[in-house]
Image (cartoon, rainbow, N blue to C red):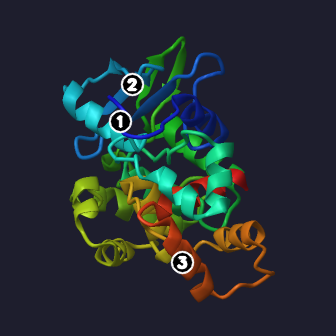
Amino acid sequence: MHARGPFSLAAAARFQRSFPAFAAPPGGDPVVDLVFPADGAWSTIAVRVTADLTGHVVADPGGLGEEEIRRQVERVLSLDVDGTGFAAVGERDPVVAGLQRRFPGLRPVLFPSPYEAAAWALIGHRISMAQGATLRRRLSEELGDSVEFGGRTVAAFPPPQRLAELAPMPGMTIRKVENLRALGAAALAGDLDADLLRAMPVDAALAHLEKLPGVGPFSAELTLIRGVGTVDLFPRETPWLYRAMADAYDLGPEPPMARLEAMARAWRPYRSWVTFLLRNAA
């Protein structure tokens, strides 16, 4: 793997350790450990990415192969995107320049698949991030595949065929269980395929996702940005972004959406990347 434009694996590893949905390795040398059901094949793979951007395959029971695994890992780390033009966004916008100095080389770290991103959105609906992380961990431990990895056992998120048969569980409403079952079935049918969604115009991809039970505008945007890796989407359904922009640009307590969207045009064609840095700064 190689990066076109600035990229820091250490920055990606720090973000991974800060986010409860990822099975992050302990501190030390900058590595990123990934254990997940491969998009489309759904066999659980395990990969360690080291500082030289080499992906060391630890587990590939389904025989997916190094080339396909590399392609999926590149998407997770946003290495499949040419980032050579991102510095120019900072040259146009001093707020973005400050974020780039604060988080040098940080690119969006995605969920391993749109399926997992959408599942996280459904699991976390109307509960705290900590509660959502607890439920996700329980699902992984009870229904996911476990991999011996770096001296520890890591449970991957369950593949969609198991989520499609999810039984009621404590802490999760029946409606949420039903929506997760439907999500598993949709993933098995190919409706959450990353290549399919990336090939669609953004509005069409959002509309496609919003047809899934429980997936509203916020969840659809999250799935595109953090699951598919859509690079240039300004999320309209993310209240924390409004507050972050209002603070960063000194816009007052309730700036109109039209003004925020107009300001974000200066971030093109990396609007999703800038929102990721703002989220990381919050």
Looking at the picture, tell me which residue is in the foreground, 165 or 2: 2
Q: Is mark 3 on a helix, strand or loop?
A: loop
Q: Quadrant of the C terminus?
A: bottom right
Q: Where is residue 244 in the image (x, y as percent from the top left)?
A: 71, 66
Look at 27% across and 32% down and name the residue there. 69
Q: What element carries label 2?
A: strand
Q: What element carries label 1?
A: helix
Q: Which mark is residue 236?
A: 3
Q: Position of residue 180 (x, y in %)?
A: 44, 60
Q: Which mark is residue 47?
A: 2
Q: Which mark is residue 134?
A: none
CB of mark 3 within 8 Å of CB of mark 2? no
- Residue 166 placement, left or right of 89: left
Look at 73% across and 71% down and name the residue there. 249
- Residue 43 placement, left or right of 236: left
Q: How far apart are marks 2 and 1 (CA)?
A: 8 Å
Q: Check disc 1 and report the residue beneath it.
A: 73
Looking at the picture, tell me which residue is in the foreground, 257 or 171: 257
Earlier sequence position, callout 3 versus callout 2: 2
Residue 79 versus residue 65 in the image, above or below = below
Tell me which amino acid carries mark 1: Val
CB of mark 1 within 8 Å of CB of mark 3? no
The answer to whether residue 235 is seen in the rendering is: no
Q: Could you classify mark 1 by the number of other residues whose Cα lies within 10 Å: few (under 14), some (14-19), or many (20 or more)?
A: many
Tell me which amino acid carries mark 2: Val
CB of mark 2 within 8 Å of CB of mark 1? yes
The answer to whether residue 278 is seen in the rendering is: yes
Looking at the picture, tell me which residue is in the foreground, 269 or 1: 269
Q: How far apart are marks 1 and 3 (CA)?
A: 28 Å
- Say which of marks 2 and 1 sits in front: 1
